[in-house]
Image (tube, rainbow, N blue to C red):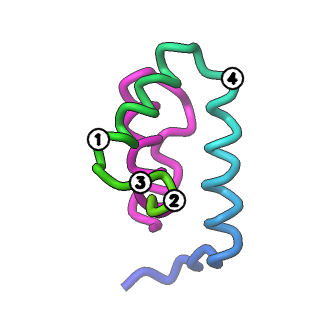
Amino acid sequence: MSNAPQATPGRQIATVFGFIADTLEWSHDDYQALIARLVSTGKSALSLTLGDVLDAYTATATTAGHDRAAALRGGH
């Protein structure tokens, strides 16, 4: 069992919204790849969870080589 402190839900939410804001600086192709991953979940936009968004962000950012890609991996 790890003794590391767990991020609070508020901090996790703020971090995911920060990741979303970062996508505004991505290239058009990277942003479109993110949208395609979100659409491929088969969920409507309003039923996506923050976990869905984080998974799509991480997969897209990792593929595109963005720095913050895995910051919350395992934390959601």
CB-based contact (under 8 Å), mark 3 and mark 2: yes
> Residue 25 shows which numbered tag?
4
Residue 65 is situated, as x and y percent measured from the top left of the image, at 46, 22
Residue carrying label 2: 46
- Which residue is at 46% across, 45% downward? 70
Ranked by sequence position, the earlier of labels 4 and 2 is 4
Q: Secondary structure at mark 2?
A: helix
Q: Could you say which quadrant of the image residue 51 lies in?
A: bottom left
| Marks 4/2: CA–CA distance | 23 Å
Residue carrying label 3: 44
Residue 50 is situated, as x and y percent measured from the top left of the image, at 51, 61
Residue carrying label 1: 40
CA neighbours of label 4 inside 10 A, class few (<14), some (14 to 19), many (20+): few
CA neighbours of label 1 inside 10 A, class few (<14), some (14 to 19), many (20+): few
- Which residue is at 59% across, 79% downward? 5
Amino acid type at circle 3 is: Ser
Residue 45: within the magenta? no
| Marks 3/1: CA–CA distance | 10 Å
Amino acid type at circle 4 is: Glu
Ranked by sequence position, the earlier of labels 1 and 2 is 1
Residue 29 is situated, as x and y percent measured from the top left of the image, at 48, 14
